Amino acid sequence: MTYGYLATMRTKAGRRDEVVQILLGGVDGLRGAGCRLYVVGVSDTDPELIWVNEVWESKEHHDASLQLPGTRAAIARAMPMLTGEFTGQELTVAGGLL
Amino acid sequence: MTYGYLATMRTKAGRRDEVVQILLGGVDGLRGAGCRLYVVGVSDTDPELIWVNEVWESKEHHDASLQLPGTRAAIARAMPMLTGEFTGQELTVAGGLL
């Protein structure tokens, strides 16, 4: 059963688009790491919040990806622009079009 | 810019899996209606909640899909199994792997 993770992160004022670019910068390597879906979304209704929807082959693939050097470097770059307010919801993907 | 919609719906006790099957039953027609992504997720941590993540070519495509006869029939079938507690968040998709 594939593993979903639905996250939000709040950025400091005016830093959202920089964080979005960091999040999108690692997309090329995701598929090889077991990622089947990775969508970064924003909304004018809450202009400092970023939504990230991910689907991975397994929770283990997702957890392992967080240890990749590129991922760790991206997290380190983004962290100073974040407020520390995160939400995360693990999901079991029942199916769909993806 | 593609349009994202992140929804949750709460089902009455014991009805979640039936509603999931209804949601997945219309997947075949989605791509032709302008849907680029449709993921149905569940979680053991809240066993009566269903998450639906959608990406459409535009908000207009999404709105139009709700008027399709198949969609309307599916909604009518699911409604009696839902509590009426819905959340929805529109998103602008910034990019990713999808």
Image: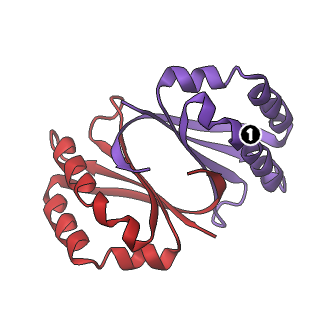
Chain colours: A purple, B red
Q: Residue at x 30, y 58 (%)?
A: B27
The quadrant where residue B78 appears: bottom left
Q: Residue at x 71, y 60 (%)?
A: A47
Image-based side of B54 in relation to B28, left or right = right
Q: Residue at x 27, y 77 (%)?
A: B68
Q: How many marks?
A: 1
Q: Position of residue A21 (x, y in %)?
A: 79, 50
| Outermost residue, front side | A32
Task: Decide: is A63 above or below B97.
Answer: above
Image-based side of B65 in relation to A21, left or right = left
Q: Provide the secondary structure element on which disc 1 rests.
A: loop
Chain holding disc 1:
A
**Where does the N terminus of chain B fall, quadrant-wise?**
bottom right
Pointer 1: what residue? A26
Q: Position of residue B87 (x, y in %)?
A: 41, 57
Q: Position of residue B95 (x, y in %)?
A: 66, 56
Image-based side of A39 in relation to B66, left or right = right
Neighbor class of circle 1 (other Cα within 10 Å; few <14, some 14-19, many 20+) is some
Image-based side of A6 in relation to B9, left or right = right
The quadrant where residue B41 appears: top left
Q: Amino acid at mark 1?
A: Gly
Q: Residue at x 20, y 49 (%)?
A: B21
Q: Position of residue A56 (x, y in %)?
A: 50, 33
Task: Decide: is B45 above or below A13.
Answer: above
A53 or A9: nearer the viewer:
A53
Task: Decide: is A93 above or below A67.
Answer: below
A31 or A9: nearer the viewer:
A31
